[in-house]
Image: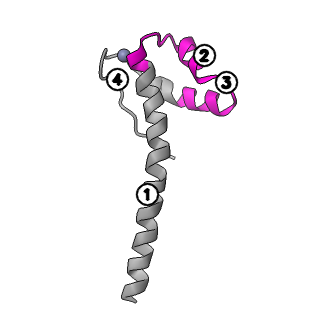
Amino acid sequence: MTVLIPVRCFTCGNLIADKFKEYQTRVKSGEDPGKVLDSFGFKRYCCRAMILTSVETIHQVIPFYEAIRRREQEVRSELE
Ligand SMILES: [Zn+2]
C-alpha cells in the first residue's frame, strides 16, 4: 500500500517521512506508538501529531476509496 504523508512537519520542519514506515512496522508488531515516537526523538507535539494523524487519515481514506470503487461498479453494471 502506498502511504502519502508529508515529508516534513508543517509546524517545525522536522523530517518525518523517513521515519514513518518504521513507525508503522513497529506499531503493527505491537509496540506502543508513543514509545516508538520517543525512540525517533520526536519530542515535539507537532511532529508526533503529524505522524499520528497521518495514520488516522489512512483509516479514514480506505473506506472512502472502497465506496468509490463500489459506486463505479454499480454505474458500470447499470450501463451494460
Ligand atoms: Zn514538528
Instruction: State the residue at coordinates (63%, 27%).
Output: 26
Q: Looking at the image, what colour scheme do you see?
A: one colour
Name which of mark 2 and mark 1 comes first in the sequence: 2
What label sits on residue 28 in the rendered view?
none
**Res 17 quadrant in image:** top left
When the figure is inspected, residue 41 is found, relative to residue 72, above or below; the finding is: above
For residue 55, side relative to residue 29 (left or right): left
Tell me the tag on residue 65: 1
Mark toward the viewer: 3 or 4: 3
Q: Residue sitting at 49 percent across and 28 percent down?
A: 20
The Cα atoms of the two marked residues, 2 and 3, are separated by: 7 Å
Labels 4 and 2: the sequence-earlier one: 4
In the picture of the structure, the residue carrying the numbered disc 3 is 31
The Cα atoms of the two marked residues, 3 and 4, are separated by 23 Å
In the image, which is nearer the foreground, mark 1 or mark 4? 1
Q: CA distance from mark 1 to mark 4?
A: 25 Å
Give the Cα distance between marks 4 and 2. Answer: 20 Å
User: What number is the disc on residue 8?
Assistant: 4
Q: Are marks 2 and 3 in contact (CB under 8 Å)?
A: yes
Q: Please give the label number shown on residue 35.
A: 2
Q: Does label 3 or label 4 sit earlier along the sequence? A: 4
Q: Position of residue 67 (x, y in %)?
A: 44, 63
**Ligand 1 lies in which image quarter?**
top left
Residue at left 53%, top 31%? 21
Boundaries of the magenta span: 21-47
Query: Is 38 within the magenta?
Result: yes
